[in-house]
Amino acid sequence: MGPFPLPTDNLYKFCAFVGVVMIGLCLYRSFNLKHEYAIREIELGAATQRADLEKTALQRLLDEVGAGTPAQRDSEALKNKQREAERLVKEYTLRNIEVISLTKQLTLIVKDRIELLFEFLIAFIAGGFLCVYGFANWRKLQQQQDKLLAPRLRRKKLNVTDPPIITVFGKTFFDIGHAPKDQSNRRKYLPGYAVWEIHPVMKLETL
């Protein structure tokens, strides 16, 4: 048996429990989809921004390489720029692939949300119905059980018609923890009671 045993002793209690679980799962799954969509949207925005920056840098390098004379194109500086441009082309291509992938993921999440909306709605309504049905009937059943148990509880009530006289034997103990500042024989929080106690109790006698 786990820490949360299923309430199988009462059908209405079980219905209410299942309804609460269904509503909780619907809300949790809906929140997860919304959170996942927000994360992918942020990632897509960041990837798109990086792709734009790389495109701008690549265009600037290509303009510098294309503007040089044939003699300058053979220089080491321009060759380095050409290699840098090639590297940027590869990065830009990979970034575009990432943007396309994230866009597809967002599209799938939106599609899943639309498809699951109807299922969530049915599950939420079913869970709400089970909650209302279970709790309402559980309350009625509990009231009936209380009415049935009330006579038994009244019969079990102890009625003492001739109370006995009890003599307590023990050591007297002045409990300083309950005494007021003037050390009088009245408790500081319960002035109707004495500070002196019989502690420990050694013997009881009834008359």
Image: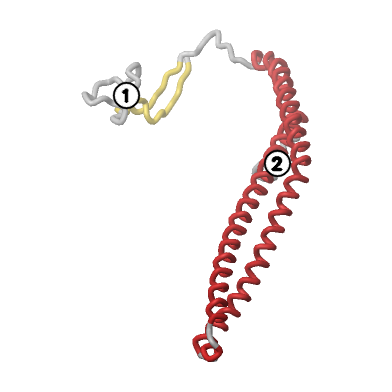
Residue at 72%, 30% (x, y): give it.
131
Is 55 placed above or below 34 here? below
Quote the CA–CA distance across marks 1 and 2.
62 Å
Pick whichever, 191 or 143, lies toward us. Answer: 143
Q: Amino acid at mark 2?
A: Cys
Q: Is residue 150 toward the left or the right of residue 205 in the image?
A: right
**x, y percentage for residue 158?**
59, 15
> 180 or 4: which is nearer to us?
4
Where does residue 148 sit, x and y in percent of width and height?
72, 16
Residue at figure coordinates x 32%, y 26% from the top left: 172
Q: Quadrant of residue 58?
A: bottom right
Q: Please tell me the numbered disc located at residue 176.
A: none
The residue at 39%/31% (across/down) is 200
Color style of the picture:
secondary structure
Compared with residue 112, is residue 73 higher up or lower down, i.e. above or below? below
Q: How many marks?
A: 2
Please tell me which of labels 1 and 2 falls first in the chain. Answer: 2
What residue sits 62% from the left and 49% below the top? 35
Tell me the residue that label 1 is attached to: 196
Q: List x then y, in percent, for residue 15.
A: 75, 32
Q: From this view, report whether residue 10 is shown above or below residue 67.
A: above
Which secondary structure, mark 2? helix
Determine the image quadrant of residue 189.
top left
Residue 50: give x, y in percent of width and height.
Answer: 56, 65
Q: Which residue is mark 2?
A: 26
